[in-house]
Each structure stands twice: as structure tokens, then as C-alpha cells.
Amino acid sequence: MPVISAQPYDYPLPANLLQVALMIIDMQRDFLEPGGFGAALGNDVSRLQAIVPAVQQLQAVFRAKGLPIIQTQEGHQRDLSDCPVSKRSRGQPQLKIGDSGPMGRILVLGELGNGIIPALEPKPDEIVISKPGKGAFYRTALEAALRSRQITHLIFTGVTTEVCVQTTMREANDRGYECLLVEDATESYFPDFKQATLDMIRAQGGIVGWTATLEATLTGLQTGSR
Ligand code: TIU
């Protein structure tokens, strides 16, 4: 049985790796570049750039093996009909969701700033799930997309660790998916929050899932077949 060496113990891979999807959460300009939603909330967005090569490496391996890749994208309709008033006003940012910024309207689908960063641009046949919330299962077709492809295992990457990544991982865990978070392919504006999230996931025998290094994940995937 192929495994990924992980914490709190080995993560078992399915016999058929086609059941494993790479989840790339919200690697958007809005979170990684100045002038977007993350910066409007007062964050130093530059520290998220460090994980781009690690995510690219996983994306390349999944592409080479022909395995499923799912990117998510947090954004709202142009009329903001899917954006709760509470979300728009939270944090009292200088630029609110829907306001015009240097990269277009903040966190609005189709705007330059809302797009996935060019380094990780999805291919036309890859799945991109737009989502109005932090969790990727809320008001999206993600669950149907996973079920129709018989995907059972989710390898998580992306930003930010304790917000959209952790929320989605918890939603997936409750739905029965085997979830692993790649430690050096996820980042937060707050290093302590990233570490706390990794600790929480691994606690209590992996109550929410597993964590593994990029190297261990790549090594484990090489042992699997499809
Ligand atoms: N603010 C923050 O840390 N994150 C978000 O608002 N969304 C995601 O995590 N993608």
C-alpha cells in the first residue's frame, strides 16, 4: 500500500492515484499581490509568495501523472448579491469588497486582482471552483465535481492556512474525504497561525487529517500507481 510519510502517522494513498486530487486554494492576486483584498485588510501580502514554487512543483507532478487538479477562487458576483453585508463590513477596511482598487474591484469575479496568479494559471481543462465563502463546499459544485470523478483523497495547498485552507479541509473531512495539508505549500499572513493550524490538524490522532512536507508528498506520490 503506497503511503505519504506524514504526521501524526503515514497517510495511506488509494491503489488508484486518480482518486487523489490536488487542491490549490485561492492562489489569487487578491491575496498575494499589493492592492488586493489581503492588503486592504492590512496584511503584508509579500510573505505568501514563498510557497509559489512548491505549489508549482505539485501542479507539475499532478499534470505529468494526469491526476486531477482543482483550484479554488474566492470572489463575488458583480452585484455582490452573494456577499453578506457582514462580510463586506468586517474589519472596516479602507477598500471594501466591490470597491475599485488598483487591480479592479476588490474580490469581484472577473477582475484582474481576483484572478489566479499567472505562475499557477490553470489549463483550460482543469477545474476552477469560484466560491463566495471561506470554505470551498459552501454554495459551490465542488462536492458534485469530486463525486463524479470518484475522488476520495485531497492534497491541500494554498492560502491562507487558517482561513480558506483550514475551513475547506474541515468541510472536506466532515464529508468523508481523506485530507492532507502540504506544510511548505501553504502560508498565512501570520506565521503563528500557520503553525497552530498544522498542530490542530495533527492533534488527537489526526482528527481533521494529516500534514506532510513537500518532499515526503512527492516521494509518496512516486510510489503510487494509476
Ligand atoms: N484574510 C485571509 O486570511 N484569508 C481570506 O480572506 N481568504 C482566504 O484565506 N483565501
Image (cartoon, rainbow, N blue to C red):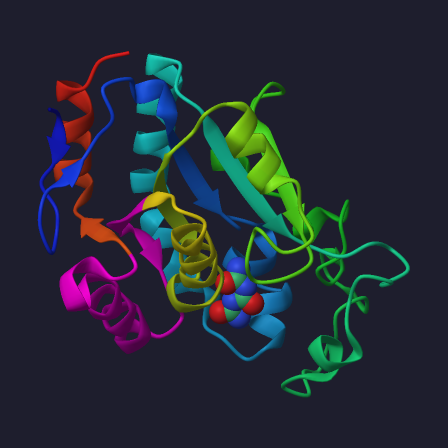
Q: Residue at x 25, y 74 (%)?
A: 196
Residue 47: quadrant of the picture: bottom left
Query: 127 or 55, which lies in front?
Result: 127
Please indicate whether residue 78 sits to the left or right of residue 171 in the image.
right
User: Against 172, is 57 above or below?
Assistant: above
Query: 35 or 149, which lies in front?
Result: 149
Please indicate whether residue 179 sits to the left or right of residue 69 in the image.
left
Residue 159 can be seen in this image = no
Q: Which residues are magenta?
A: 179-208
Residue 29: x, y in percent? 58, 52
Residue 22: quadrant of the picture: top left
Residue 71: x, y in percent? 53, 39
Please indicate whether residue 206 sits to the left or right of residue 157 in the image.
left
Q: Residue furthest bottom?
A: 92
16 magenta-colored:
no
Query: 103 or 28, which lies in front?
Result: 28
Q: Residue at x 50, y 23 (%)?
A: 149
Residue 62 can be seen in this image = yes
The number of numbered discs placed on residues in the rendered structure image is 0
User: Against 34, is 215 above or below?
Assistant: above
Residue 152: x, y in percent? 38, 33
Please indicate whether residue 181 sits to the left or right of residue 34 in the image.
left
Q: Residue at x 9, y 41 (%)?
A: 5
Q: Residue furthest right?
A: 79
Residue 92: quadrant of the picture: bottom right
